[in-house]
Image: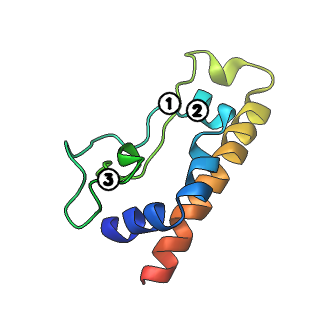
């Protein structure tokens, strides 16, 4: 499945870049994946212009929240905003997984 997601990134790089390079996405999710391979994965072109997008060992994102987050009066709206920003990324990954199955 990881190979399929990486291949989708390669095949649809402009769509993927539009999602992960959006300023608000970058602000909320500065890191794509928790672990990475050191080089371009086997079977992918070495000259791929965006190797960092196919090097993750997982396609996960996370955001930092302050300790008092749940005490803030607008915590629910802030949470909704984070999920709205994350949704295009999840849709991209889920389309690939749905096609893979």
Q: Is residue 17 above or below residue 8?
A: above
Q: Label 1 neighbourhood size at 10 Å, few (<14), some (14-19), many (20+)? A: some
Q: Is residue 54 above or below residue 100?
A: above
* Element at label 2: helix
Nearest to N terminus: mark 1 or mark 3: 1
- The part of the image, by quadrant, that contains residue 28 is top right
Q: Which mark is residue 86?
A: none
- The part of the image, by quadrant, that contains residue 77 is top right
Residue 100 or 71: which is nearer the viewer?
Answer: 100
| Residue 63: image location, x then y, percent | 53, 31
Q: Is residue 101 above or below residue 14?
A: below
- Asked whether the beta carbons under mark 1 and mark 2 sit within 8 Å of each other, the answer is yes
| Left or right for 75, reference 17 | right
Q: Label 3 neighbourhood size at 10 Å, few (<14), some (14-19), many (20+)? A: few
| Left or right for 83, reference 34 | right
Say which residue label 3 marks.
47
Residue 9 or 75: which is nearer the viewer?
Answer: 9
Say which residue label 1 marks.
30
Identified at 42% across, 47% down, the residue is 50
Say which residue label 2 marks.
26
Nearest to N terminus: mark 2 or mark 3: 2
Per the model, the C-alpha gap separating discs 1 and 2 is 5 Å
| Residue 81: image location, x then y, percent | 74, 38
* Element at label 1: loop
């Amino acid at each position: 499945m990881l190979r399929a997601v990486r291949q989708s990134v390669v095949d649809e790089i402009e769509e993927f870049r539009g999602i992960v390079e959006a300023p608000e996405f970058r602000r909320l999710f500065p890191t794509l994946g928790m672990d990475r391979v050191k080089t371009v994965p086997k079977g992918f072109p070495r000259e791929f212009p965006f190797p960092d997008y196919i090097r993750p060992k997982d396609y996960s994102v996370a955001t930092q929240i302050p300790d008092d987050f749940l005490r803030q009066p607008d915590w629910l709206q802030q949470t909704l905003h984070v999920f709205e920003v994350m949704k295009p990324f999840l849709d991209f990954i889920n389309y690939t997984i749905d096609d893979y199955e």
